[in-house]
Image (cartoon, coloured by chain):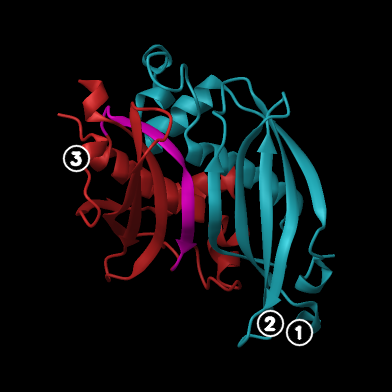
Chain colours: A red, B cyan
Amino acid sequence: MPTYYEDYEVGDTEEFGERTVTKEEIIEFAEKYDPQPFHTDEEAAKETMFGGLAASGWHTAAICMRMYVDHMIDEASQGARGVDELRWIKPLRPGDTLTAEVEVVDKYPDENNPHIGYVDTKLTAYNQDDEAVISWIGLGIIDRKSTAE
Amino acid sequence: MPTYYEDYEVGDTEEFGERTVTKEEIIEFAEKYDPQPFHTDEEAAKETMFGGLAASGWHTAAICMRMYVDHMIDEASQGARGVDELRWIKPLRPGDTLTAEVEVVDKYPDENNPHIGYVDTKLTAYNQDDEAVISWIGLGIIDRKSTAE
């Protein structure tokens, strides 16, 4: 059964994952979307502030989105309006394994459309050493049970 | 010559692009990172709030990042701490052509590290009908000329 707007409670948390990232996919994504030396070139990356190859922050977000979709998203989800406070806290390195934690931080009905409500969730992803790598607050749009049924 | 922290002025704007997105790449990205029906399945997408296939918001961001890297990023750039107020304003559709506008909205030195400063830029990307599709405020880290020379 889908998780409707009414089913979410502020303070609810979920943990899920996990996903190991390879050097090859870090470079492949970066060559396509974010070709900066610290994302594409293992040698050149050593001379930068990153001190070695690190995934594009957008790649890190995309990997977490995939874990989020696989675990939390169902047909009651209607996308998102955006994201607040996206933070790249630590570099994601080749061989790192991510797990994610999601907390419902707010919910509110749409004033005009009785079919949907808004659910804000804070996602934080950790590496294998339990260090936070990325976090953001997603502004999700969710179907309301009362009108879906 | 690189654009250093000192070279940025609040209020500076740049326009650049353009990039046309195909149905094939929308589906390819979404199957990997955001497999929701409105991003992966042209027929199923018609029955959703999107009313048709639309790019993952993370894909839209990644495409804009590529335009940003190609136009604005040089060796004085040391990545970013994150992004505020990421908004998916309109769906990005197959065949749409994006152009981007970037405005410097704030800058401030690092209190502890004399080698870097922070430059906040608001990126807005528009489709071929001049409708805003996505916007965000990027929190960039930029080398300082005074210590780089």
Q: Secondary structure at mark 3?
A: helix
Q: Which residues are magenta?
A: A74-89
Residue at mark 3 to residue at mark 1: CA–CA distance: 54 Å
Q: Is residue A77 magenta?
A: yes
Q: Residue furthest front?
A: A111
Q: Secondary structure at mark 1?
A: helix
Q: Nearer the viewer, residue B14 or B88?
A: B88
- Image location (x, y in percent) of residue A98: 30, 57
Say which amino acid is labelled 2. Answer: His
Say which amino acid is labelled 3. Answer: Asp
Residue at mark 3 to residue at mark 2: CA–CA distance: 49 Å
Q: Is residue A41 magenta?
A: no
Q: Nearer the viewer, residue A4 or A83?
A: A4
**Residue located 63% across and 86% down the image:** B111
Our reading of the magenta stretch's main secondary structure is strand
Image disc number at residue B115: 2
